[in-house]
Image (tube, rainbow, N blue to C red):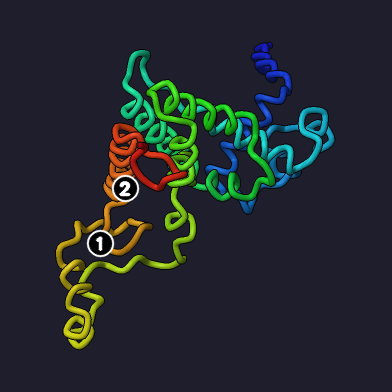
Amino acid sequence: MTRQPEAAPRAPLSRDRVLRAAVALADSTGIEALSMRRLAQELGVVPMALYKHVAHKEELLDGMVETVVGEIGPPAPGTGWRAAVRLRILSARTALLGHPWAAQVIRSRTGPTPAVLAHLDAVIGTFRAGGLSADLTHHAMHALGSRVLGFTQEVFDAAPGPAPQGPAILPPEAAAAYPHVAELAMAAAHDGDSVVGGGCDDRFEFEFALDLLLEGFERLHRQGWTSAGGGVAG
C-alpha cells in the first residue's frame, strides 16, 4: 500500500503573519474587499483566531500601515542631508506604489502609527543633522506635506475614470480661447496611466516638485532664513 505523503505543518498564526496576509489580500483584491472573515478564510483559520493578534479591523489597518511603511529604506550612511531626504522620500513612494491602497489607509488613520512617526522623525532628524534650524525644518515639513510619505493629494484625489489623453481632448475653440493651456498640453510628456493629470508623467512630476522644494530649503538655509522675519536673518 502506497503511503500518502504527510501534509507540511501549517505555520503558526502570528501577528506578523496576519498583517502580511492582510497586505497581500488588499494588494490583490483591493482594500474595500478586506474583512476579518475574508482574511481568516485566506489564512485557513476561524475569524476568532485573528482577534488574538489584532483586536479589531482598525488595529488591523494600523498594522498594515506599519508593514508597508516598514518597507521604506534608509539612505546610505554619510549621504548629504538633501540627497538623504530625497532618497528616503522616493523610497516611501516606491513602497506606497507597491500597495495602491496604502495612501488611502494612511490618510484614514486618526493619528500616525509608530512606523510613520519613526519615518517622520528620521526625515526631521536628517534636516537637523544637515544644519537646518528647527524653525526652517518645521516649515519644510509643512511644505512637503503628504509628499514626505511618498504621495500627493492630487494623486490620492484623482477622479475615477479614464485619464484624458493630452491635447486631443481640447476642442479647437477651447484651444483658441485658452492658448496657454493648449500650449502646455502640446508640450506635455504623454503618459496615459498618469493620475496627476492627462499628459503628465507621475514620477517625473513628483520628483520635479520634490527637487524644487529641497533646493528651496537649501537656499533658505544658506541665507539664514527665519519665519520671524520672513527672510534672511540679520
Question: Residue 209 bears which disc, if any?
Answer: 2
Element under label 2?
Answer: helix
Query: Within 10 angstroms of label 2, few (less than 14), some, or many (20 or more) residues?
Result: few
Q: Amino acid at mark 1?
A: Gly
Name the residue rendered at 47%, 40% in the picture: 141
Residue 70 visible in image: yes
Name the residue rendered at 29%, 44% in the picture: 212
Relative to 84, residue 158 above or below: below
Name the residue rendered at 27%, 57% in the picture: 200
Residue 4 visible in image: no
Element under label 1?
Answer: loop
Relative to 160, residue 30 above or below: above
Residue carrying label 1: 199
Of 33 and 5, the residue lying toward us = 33
Say which quadrant the C terminus sits in.
top left
- Relative image position of residue 196 (x, y in whole percent): 36, 58
Q: CA distance from mark 2 to mark 1?
A: 17 Å
Lateral position of residue 24 relative to residue 233, left or right: right
- Relative image position of residue 76 (x, y in whole percent): 36, 16
Locate residue 137: give its quadrant. Answer: top left
Name the residue rendered at 67%, 42% in the picture: 111
Say which quadrant the N terminus sits in.
top right
Lateral position of residue 61 relative to residue 84, left or right: right
Residue farthest along the front direction in this orientation: 234
Of 63 and 131, the residue lying toward us = 131
- Relative image position of residue 142 (x, y in whole percent): 48, 45
Q: Earlier in the sequence, mark 2 or mark 1?
A: 1
Q: Amino acid at mark 2?
A: Ala
